Each structure stands twice: as C-alpha cells, then as structure tokens.
Amino acid sequence: IWKKHRQIASKIFTIRSLKDHMFKCFMATTDEFLLKIAELSGDDNDSDLKSVNVNDMFARLTLEAFTFIAFGVKLDCIAKAPQVLEFPKAFDGAFASLAYRILDPFYLVKKWLNIGKEKQLKQHIKIVNDFAYDIIQKRTQVLNCFVYVFLVIPLCTLNFFLT
C-alpha cells in the first residue's frame, strides 16, 4: 500500500503543481491573513493601535494553508482569530504531549494508567482523528459523483489518494 501511495504522491508533487496549486493557496491565505492583522491591530487610520499575537497568527496561517492544500478544507482559523478553535488547539496539544514524552521516562506507565499528559494526548488525538475522518467521509461521498469532482471540488492532495 505504501509503495502505491508513494507512486501517486510523486506524480502530484511536481514543480508545476507546486507552482500552480500551492502558490495560489498560500497567496489566498496570506491575503486573508494580512486583512485580519490589519483588522486586529486597528489599522484603519486610527491612532489607537492594538497589539497582536504574531506567533499565534503565523501558526494560524500555516495551519490554514496546509489544511487547504492537503484536504481542500478551509478551517477559518484566521478569520475567527483571536477565538480559540477546537481542532488547532487539539493539534497543538497533541504535539506538545508527544514532545513531552522525550522528557518523561514513565510515559508508558502513564499511558497504561491513562493519567496526566497521556490522558490529554488521547483526548487530543480523538479530536484530530474525528476531524480527519469527517473530512475523508465527506470527500468520499462527494467523489462518488464523478461530475461534481471535476467541476466543484478544489484540487487537493486528499482527492488523489481517495480516487
């Protein structure tokens, strides 16, 4: 299975596809990002400028762009800033919990007992998996309609693996 998926993916990630599809996705996401930064900072010729968490905004930009490229789905995490959304919070929480395992020699015991960071990791992974499975299920249902695939669905990496 891995070899088949690698062959499919190697045809997807050509220089042309990188230039065309991914560049367009990043440009659209960056435009939305810049508008939101201007909105949050109060940059409407107002002398009362506000502070903006740039680290959070760049994390949102990256997540938004890559989920749109990979899944063809807009999370709207930039548009909803500074509101905290469930999927990005769970994704970051899962990553932090996994990184913590390096420092914790008893993580296997905690995993077995379902306590501490391992309990949090389990909850975060469930949210991430539910999000991904929901996208895959919806996309699989839509792919059953051949005409709809080529006329309406945006080009994304997930389409190539599901077809």
Image (cartoon, rainbow, N blue to C red):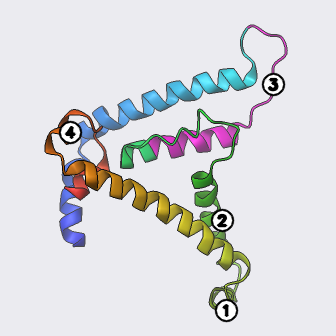
Query: Does the image show residue 98?
Result: no
Q: Position of residue 120 (x, y in %)?
A: 67, 72
Q: Indicate yes or no whether the magenta region holds residue 77.
A: no
**SS at badge 4:** helix
CB of mark 4 within 8 Å of CB of mark 2?
no
Q: Earlier in the sequence, mark 1 or mark 4?
A: 1
Q: Earlier in the sequence, mark 4 or mark 2?
A: 2
Q: Position of residue 15 (x, y in %)?
A: 25, 40
**SS at badge 1:** helix
Residue picked out by circle 1: 109
Quadrant location, the N terminus: bottom left
CB of mark 3 within 8 Å of CB of mark 1?
no
Q: CA distance from mark 4 to mark 2?
A: 39 Å
Q: Tell me which amino acid carries mark 2.
A: Ala
Residue 29 is left or right of residue 137, and the answer is: right
CB of mark 3 within 8 Å of CB of mark 4?
no
Residue range in magenta is 45-66
Q: Which mark is residue 148?
A: 4
Residue picked out by circle 2: 96
Q: Earlier in the sequence, mark 3 or mark 4?
A: 3
Farthest residue, direction left: 146
Q: Residue at x 81, y 19 (%)?
A: 49
Indicate which label's residue lies in the foreground, 1 or 4.
Answer: 4
Q: Nearer the viewer, residue 101 or 41?
A: 41
CB of mark 2 within 8 Å of CB of mark 1?
no
Q: Tell me which amino acid carries mark 1.
A: Val
Q: Earlier in the sequence, mark 3 or mark 1?
A: 3
Looking at the image, is 84 positioned above or below residue 140? Answer: above
Q: Rate crowding at label 3 as few (under 14), some (14 to 19) or many (20 or more) other CA atoms within 10 Å.
A: few
Query: Does the image show residue 127?
Result: yes
Q: Position of residue 8 (x, y in %)?
A: 19, 57
Residue picked out by circle 3: 50
